[in-house]
Amino acid sequence: MIKNLFLFLTLFTVLPLQANTVESILENGMKIIVREDHRAPVVASQVWYRIGSTYEYDGITGVSHVLEHMMFKGTKKLKPGDFSEIIAANGGSDNAFTSHDFTGYHQRIASDRLEICLELEADRMRNVIFLQEEFNKELAVVQEERRWRVDNKPKSKLFEQFYATAFLSSPKRIPVIGWMGDLESLEMKDAADWYQQWYAPNNATLVVVGDVDSNEVIKLAKKYFAKLKPSDIKPPKLRPEIAQTGERRIKLYGQTASPYMIMGYKTPVLVGNKDKVKDIYALDVMSAILDGGSSARIAKNMLRGTEIAADAGTSYDPFDRLSGLFLFAGTPSEGVKPEQLEQAFKSEIKDLQDTPVTSKELERVKAQVIASKVFERDSMFYTGMQIGMLDSVGLDWRILDTYVDDIRSITAEDVQRVAKEYFDSSQLTVATLWPEQESK
Amino acid sequence: MMNMKKWVLALTSSVVLLSQSAFALDIQTWKTSNGVEVLFVESHDLPMIDVRLAFKAGSSRDGDLYGISRLVNALIVEGTGDYSSEDVAENFESVGAELGHDSLRDMAFVSLRSLSDKQAWEKVVDLFARVSALPSFPLDAIERDRKSMLISLANREKEIGDVAEDTFYKNLYKNHVYKVGRAGTKQTMQAITQKNLSDFHSKYYVANNATLALMGDLTLDQAKQYAEQITQYLKAGQKASPIEAVKMAEQGGTIKVPFKTSQTHIIQGLPVMKRGDDDYYALYLGNHILGGSGFSSRLMQEIRENRGLSYSVYSYFLPMESNGPFQMALQTKNHQVDEASQLLNQMLVDFIKDGPTDAEIDHSKKNITGSFPLKIDSNNKIVEYLSLIGFYDLPLDYLDSFNANILKVTSEDIKDAFSRRVKPEQLIRVIVGEAS
């Protein structure tokens, strides 16, 4: 009873703080979202494009990410490298990121320098020039990035091949960094065409979080972005995943001392599944019941308890653009086989199917969600990331404000229902990594 | 509010000094009744509190039992008094609080992030004090954590980046306590007993060896009261003895480690700087220009942007209680190793000989001074700085005077400091890859 009262009171301290976010759409279709946060005289400025590896197809995989690198290589006005030099000279830092569903460019800078960022971003939205020499060097850099991120890390390789096994027709199978073979044959024209096709104000959102006046930001955004011409942006073809009708397994051998295993079940996402909202939040709660801390079931039963795993966890992302997976992954303890770890994960699923979760567990998950909503606001960059990610996949960022309520509405019966519905072995993909010497 | 008419002007304007006076940290400091130094910053913007309780209890205190500092630190969350691992976890997580811990070469810490709401905070603050001061070191938890650390240790030998770093430290600190990091060694990890663990804890997790950083939604009075509460179970104990200085090898050398890979890792460097070092600002600014400022740095410009040799290339000084390393690193495909390695070395030699240009100094000063507010724009960053300032006995105005100290540095200062402190003939170079 006291605990419920506490939750109720805390909720009230959280919600009103979210109110100071405004959204505006320019005539050319570009969206501007500003969240005022006056804790420090700084700002996070992010331009998001709705383009990423799930828009790509065989032969040009990795092109979105290569293009992200080329965005620093000069425009009609700027020499290669000038963009970052100007931001640095103004005390800022800048970088960019590419993911499955979006590509983002961001600066962190004193709030009275925001205008510089906007002018520079507007310039490179339309005026990037592609120089062959720069492209060749940058393609070599990206290949080194792939060797560093994936080729030298057997777990990363395992995840890459796991996704390519779980998804056969959906572009979710494409790694963000691209297959090495495709990177080797990628041409400058591929990147330049990709830029022409996808980089336009009507395929972009500016997210600004920080010590700014939202009306001023919108005025400034208009000053620099409103003059840019929109493009004819055709949404990507759907390329839905074919129905899975049986489990799939792969093995990989690599330089590792201990085995590792990943298993995943096909699960829906919020995008395009309005009728399944309850299921989706219930899956989110289920992931927290299993892996939301040291008192959650996996830590309690598998890391302690049977000690079957040296590390283990789950992940489920309801906010991707395309349907994905509910993942389990872990390192078996010394002497334990990956198959045994798989059985242990499955017996956790079975418990969730057979017995409703306890109210104590649900209370814990809810308390964590409420607290993490407060903790998240400590980082303006992260706040901007959350808004941008949702907007990029076509979701309304305002669901951030109702997230706590959505999670609070999930009952033990909801969790039991989704545990029964989505965790059928016909929907399962399993990938295991083995030390090389055992490969004979 | 936007007064920059043209960004091109910004490049040629003089050094930027933001209105720091309006955005400085008001650090309050005092000692608890049992002698723990407290650093506190009050901020009511968010309804949350951050705590970081740090001890001179990193791997440099391991003695012969390499890895013990990390095992002690990991076992903090595994029980106290009647509370099992699970009880501890449940208590923190039931109110959404986050109990953290980590250990490095100098420092080991226990941290807490909680809502400031009375019910949440009061549920966890006493338990936080207990786990830090009175861990029970249960045998089953010791074995469990030991096994899991042995697995990560075995995997370190298969991960090229870890192999490069471990080899680098081993050769930089041949006869010094910084030689083996927190991961320990297989032999010593197997030998550690429950008594070793509780002895280590009783010696180092004590009031006179602790600093407490507190940040967030508290008044000064509350902070004083909670600081007492957080430290109440710590025995007085003694401050750990100072870590010996590093004896520099007269002659450096190259160590090649064969490794099956398509990309070779290169690290080079030497031991240089202590916290509070007189050359700190000259070396910091110099390194910012050489390899510490991301895309703007010389290393990034030449090795990545001009030649496409590596995705990541950087250099840094890591000031520690004793002489922490200066380190330069890159990764490149095997057949480019000679070119990349020679270039990395030549760029350092040239920098020491010629120093930075005035334009480079001006650019870096603008970046460093202009980015000051970004250093302290979150509770998380502030509590880390408080802990660092307390732990290394840095002046309380370390942050507020940072810009002024950077602006004083001249090109001559940088040349002078680099030529005295970074001697190319003493460099240790580690190359891990197939080309070896």
Image (cartoon, helix red, strand yellow):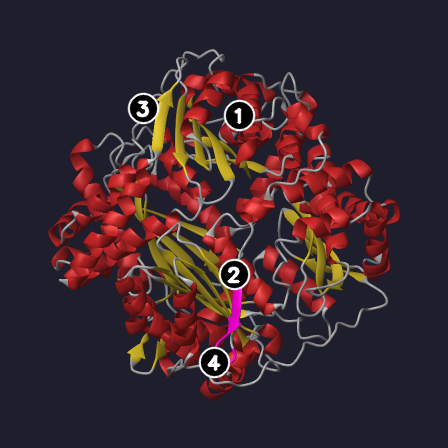
Is B33 inside the magenta-drawn segment?
yes
Tag 3 and tag 4 share a subunit: no
Alpha carbons under labels 3 and 1: distance apart = 33 Å
Measured Cα–Cα span from mark 3 to mark 2: 43 Å
Q: Residue furthest right?
A: B353
Q: The residue tagged with tag 2: helix, strand or loop?
A: helix
The tag earlier along the polypeptide, 3 or 2, is: 3
Q: Secondary structure at mark 3?
A: loop
Mark 2: few/some/many CA within 10 Å (<14, 14-19, 20+): few
Please tell me which of labels 2 and 1 falls first in the chain: 1
Quarter placement of the N terminus of chain A: bottom left
Secondary element type, mark 4? loop
Image disc number at residue B33: 4
Under circle 1, the secondary element is helix
Residue A39 appears at what percent x and percent y?
45, 45
Mark 2 → mark 4, Cα distance in angstroms: 59 Å
Residues rendered magenta in the picture = B27-35
- Mark 4 surroundings within 10 Å by alpha-carbon count, few (fewer than 14), some (14 through 19), many (20 or more): few
Q: From the image, tell me which residue sits under label 1.
A: A118
Q: Position of A304 compared to B29: left or right?
A: left
In the rendered image, residues at marks 3 and 2 fall on the same chain: yes
> Could you tell me which residue is drawn at 48 percent across and 82 percent down?
B34
Label 3 close to label 1 by CB (< 8 Å): no
Q: Chain of mark 2?
A: A
Q: Amino acid at mark 3?
A: Leu
Q: Is residue B335 magenta?
A: no
The dot on residue A238 is 3
In front of the other: B320 or A2: A2
Q: Which residue is mark 2?
A: A437
* Nearer mark to the viewer, of 2 and 1: 1
